[in-house]
Each structure stands twice: as C-alpha cells, then as structure tokens.
Image: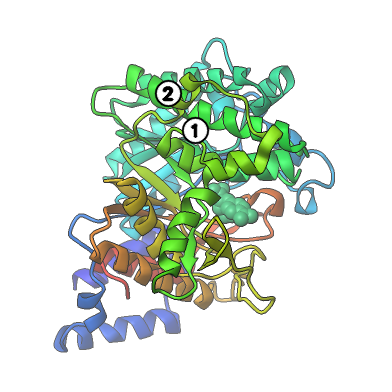
C-alpha cells in the first residue's frame, strides 16, 4: 500500500507519462503482493547497509547550471575553452546545460523522489568572485543560499564542493591559473568566504574535486580547460600549487566557518587492486597506493612527497618550503573518493616492490572509453585509505557510469548496463562497509545527464535522462533501481 502510494508520488513528480501504463510499471506492481506474501528477497538481508548509511547523488556547477551570463557571473576557463572551436565534442558549451540555475527546485524534487538523504553540488567560483578575487557578488552567494534552503526544506543534507574545475578566467589571465601561487591564495580566500556564508546550514565542505583531472588533463594533456601542455617541471609546480590551495582552503574554512564545520576533499585517487587477492600482491597494492598518488592524496595525508616521486622527477620536482608541506597536510575531517576505474598491480622484484599491469585490449569498459569496469575498486579504495592513513570518516563522492541511453517511443530508458554496473560496484562497497571501513555515505554520479566536459552532451551519466531541447527529465531504469536500493538500504 505505502509502496503504491510512494510510486504514485514518484510518478507525479517526474511526469505522469514516465511511469504510467507501461509493462515495466505493471510488472513491478504485480510483484508487490507476492513480495508481501513471501519471505523477503535474501539479498535484502545479506547486502544490507548499516542503519543511517547516507545515499545521495552528485553534480557540478558548470555541468548542470547554465545561466552562464546571469546573476553577475564572470567567465570561467570552461566558458573560454568550450567556446574555442574544436575543444569539445560538437563544439558544445555549458551556456544552458540542464538549466538548473532556473530549475533547481524541480531538480531537488528529483532527488526527493529517489529518497536521497544527501546531495553533493559545487559552487561556481566566478559566480561568487566574477574576477576571482575582490568584492563578492551578492547574487552569487544568494543563489547557493536558496539551493541550500530548498534542499533542507526537502530533508536533504547539502554537501558543498568549492572547486569543480570552473576557475575564474580572470585568474587564468592574470596569473596563469594553477601555475601561480596567487591562485592558491585566492582559492583560500574564496573558500573562507563561502564557508562564512553557508556553514550555518552546510556542515560538510569539499575543497577540490579530482586534482589529476583538472591538472593532468588541463595542464599536461590539453584535453580540459585551459588546454595547456606544460613541460614536466611546470606541471609539477602546478600540481603543488593545487594541493597548496587545498590546504589554504582547509585552514580558511576552519577560521571562517561555524565551529563543527567538517572539511575534506573529493579525490579520484589511483586505486591499485591486487591481481590476486593474496600476499604478496596485497602488500604491493598498498605500496602502489602511496606511490601512484604521490603528487596529490599522499602528500596531503603524509605532509611529504614520497622519495620514489622526488627521485623519479629529479630536477623537475616541484619547489616548495617546509611551511607549504604543513599547510598541504592540514588535518581533514573526512576523505571523499571518486571511484570509477581499477589499476591492477602485482608484486615485483624491483626496488619499488610493485608493477602496474596494463589492461589487455579486450578489457571491458562502459560508454566512456576510459571507464574500465572494476567493481573491486569500490572495496579497495576505502580499504587502502583506511589502512594506510587511518582515515576515520569516508564518503564515496562519485561513482557511476556512461551508457548509450536510448529513450523509447513510450518514454523509457532501459539502461540495464548501468544497473549492472551499479549492482556490482555497490556489492564491493558493501564488502568494505561489512569489514568496518568507515564509509558513511555514497554519492552517485550523476543525478541527471549533463555537460560531460570534453565529451559535451554526447555521453550520459545521469539517473534521469535529459532531453536537451525541452529540458524534460525522464527517470531511467537505473533511477528506479537506485530508489529501491535507498528504500531497502541494501544492494538489490
Ligand atoms: C569525473 N578520466 O571526471 C568528474 O568529477 C565529473 O565531473 C565527471 O562528469 C565524471 O567523473 C564522469 O566523467 C572524470 O579520464 C573525468 O579518467 C575523466 C576521467 C575520470 C573522471
């Protein structure tokens, strides 16, 4: 009965056409009386998560908001990059994206329909400081303040990311972006300001999203904004400036936020998986975790660049002071991990003690060519981070996949591959939690299809299908699946 009611409520929010009079709905509905009569699905017991486990979704400002020239927003490096012909698939831009800037209330209802308890969104720095520094733009913080209020009014806890790649263009022009410590300093000031304005209602802040994506893809490979290809010494310095910025932001949030405000980061660490789950490969994978994440997570957790990295880079190693390392390793309240792909590692006789095993050409991946399928990554990320660095609070800040979604004429998206992906990754997460690695919550990437960076609108990661011509959102099969997972607090 209550299930019927909630399904009807779900249908109402997402548009009646999406859920009515379909074989999918009928099949689900007819299963209900049977489920009540028979013992529950054993999976619901075996793969159940602890009470209070937090389920939610993640998005990012440039990928969903649009409203690029509204509310006093200044340009970001992604506006410049996407408007440069040849940089993004079909020369698509985030000018409109999901139009969430105008539709955030509707989008928060989508979250509510799923039963989400938490939502990870990002603040667009150039909405707050259109020139990167200086006087804040009141319309900018007002927008996020309204988003936060709307989330809280719907019983959803906001988790705020401060940097998800949309650097103010002014900082790129004036200082060369992350090539300069001026940008690190400016980030600290921006982070402190946002915390001072939102921490009465937002209790969790992430400084940065994915160092390697915005630095390595943006400053080494030229595939992301600002589209540079730096030499190794300059690249390592940009990496250093980015982790320094993170540390300055941690300190600024502690100084300017309400007491009790929690700070962490959302990092797509390299996740070594032992080729065989037995010694000595397990030990090799732990050693690999420290070395392969040397420039980012390891220096943040340890306050020191590991010798292997410094030796390997030689004269190209970054220049820094002891004070820098103290700032970079400012203590965190939690670690967020974006988990997508595995890195297979085996034990090796070399001084490093491990070797990375490159995937064979037959290795399966999702619609994004880089998205190799490795469900065990969602077990090994919390295990390595918990065992190596003793982290006491963790979140999975992103996990999900692209799929070649097709909207059927009667308005469905049967993304069985995404459901397969989620089921298998979540079973690995369940194992980590069952073994007491302290993962408190999971954010699925993403709530809805959105601007997938250099892939434009060509690759879809959402639980909701977005028709970009009409901005209509349609729940995919995976949205129904995730809603059931949240409802049962178990992997189905
Ligand atoms: C993450 N790679 O990006 C980002 O945090 C999201 O903004 C993005 O939409 C999502 O994952 C899906 O791509 C990544 O090439 C981009 O390995 C590229 C890679 C990994 C993550």
On-image quarter of the N terminus:
bottom left
Please indicate whether residue 321 sits to the left or right of residue 381 in the image. Answer: right
x then y, percent, for residue 228: 77, 37
Please indicate whether residue 437 sits to the left or right of residue 161 in the image. Answer: left
In this rendering, does residue 389 appear at all? yes
x then y, percent, for residue 213: 61, 45
The residue drawn where x is 26% and y is 73% is 47
Crowdedness of circle 1 by 10 Å Cα count: few (<14), some, many (20+)?
A: many
Q: Which of the numbered marks, if any, corresponds to residue 234?
A: none
x then y, percent, for residue 229: 78, 39
Q: Earlier in the sequence, mark 1 or mark 2?
A: 1
In this rendering, does residue 268 appear at all? no
The residue drawn where x is 29% and y is 29% is 261
Q: Between residues 126 and 227, which one lies in front from this camera angle?
A: 227
Q: Secondary structure at mark 2?
A: helix
Q: Residue furthest top?
A: 135
Q: Disc 1 designates what residue?
A: 123
Q: Disc 2 designates what residue?
A: 194
Between the C-alphas of marks 1 and 2, the distance is: 9 Å
Q: Residue furthest right?
A: 85
> Within the image, what quadrant is residue 312 found in?
top right
- Vertical position of residue 52 compared to residue 366: above or below: above
The residue drawn where x is 45% and y is 76% is 276
Mark 1 and 2 residues: CB-CB less than 8 Å, in contact? yes
> Within the image, what quadrant is residue 434 found in?
bottom left
- Vertical position of residue 114 compared to residue 218: above or below: below
Q: Between residues 174 and 155, which one lies in front from this camera angle?
A: 174
């Amino acid at each position: 009965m209550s299930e019927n009611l909630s399904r009807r409520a779900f249908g109402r929010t997402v548009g009646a056409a999406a859920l009515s009079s379909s074989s999918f709905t009928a099949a689900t509905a007819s299963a209900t009386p049977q489920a009540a009569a028979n013992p529950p699905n054993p999976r619901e017991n075996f793969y159940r998560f602890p009470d209070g486990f937090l389920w939610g979704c993640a998005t990012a400002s440039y990928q969903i908001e649009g409203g690029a020239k509204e509310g006093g927003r200044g340009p970001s490096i992604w506006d410049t990059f996407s408007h440069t012909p040849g940089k993004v698939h079909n020369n698509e831009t985030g000018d409109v994206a999901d139009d969430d800037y105008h539709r955030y209330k509707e989008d928060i209802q989508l979250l509510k329909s799923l039963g989400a308890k938490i939502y990870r969104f990002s603040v667009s720095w150039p909405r707050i400081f259109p020139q990167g520094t200086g006087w804040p733009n009141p319309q900018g913080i007002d927008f996020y303040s309204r988003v936060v209020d709307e989330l809280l009014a719907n019983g959803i806890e906001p988790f705020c990311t401060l940097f998800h790649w949309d650097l103010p263009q002014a900082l790129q022009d004036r200082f060369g972006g992350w090539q300069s410590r001026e940008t690190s300093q400016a980030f600290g000031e921006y982070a402190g300001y946002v915390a001072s304005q939102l921490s009465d209602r937002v209790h969790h802040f992430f400084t940065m999203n994915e160092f390697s994506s915005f630095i390595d893809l943006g400053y080494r490979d030229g595939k992301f904004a600002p589209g540079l290809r730096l030499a190794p010494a300059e690249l390592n310095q940009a990496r250093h400036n980015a982790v320094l910025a993170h540390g300055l932001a941690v300190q600024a949030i502690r100084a300017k936020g309400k007491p009790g405000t929690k700070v962490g980061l959302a990092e797509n660490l390299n996740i070594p998986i032992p080729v065989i789950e037995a010694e000595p490969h397990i030990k090799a994978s732990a050693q690999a975790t420290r070395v392969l994440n040397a420039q980012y997570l390891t220096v943040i957790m340890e306050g020191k660049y590991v010798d292997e990295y410094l030796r390997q880079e030689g004269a190209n190693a970054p220049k820094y002071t002891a004070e820098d390392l103290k700032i970079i390793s400012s203590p965190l309240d939690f670690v967020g991990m974006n988990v997508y792909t595995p890195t297979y590692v085996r034990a090796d006789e070399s001084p490093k003690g491990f070797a990375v095993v490159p995937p064979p050409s037959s290795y399966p991946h999702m619609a994004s060519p880089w998205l190799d399928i490795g469900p065990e990554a969602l077990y090994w990320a919390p295990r390595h981070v918990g065992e190596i660095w003793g982290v006491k609070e963790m979140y999975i800040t992103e996990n999900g996949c692209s799929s070649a979604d097709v909207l059927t004429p009667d308005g469905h998206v049967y993304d069985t591959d995404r459901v397969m992906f989620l089921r298998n990754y979540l079973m690995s997460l369940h194992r980590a939690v069952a073994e007491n690695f302290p993962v408190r919550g999971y954010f699925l990437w993403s709530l809805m299809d959105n601007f997938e960076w250099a892939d434009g609108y060509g690759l879809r990661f959402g639980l909701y299908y977005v028709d970009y011509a009409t901005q209509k959102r349609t729940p995919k099969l995976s949205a129904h699946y995730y809603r059931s997972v949240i409802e049962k607090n178990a992997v189905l």
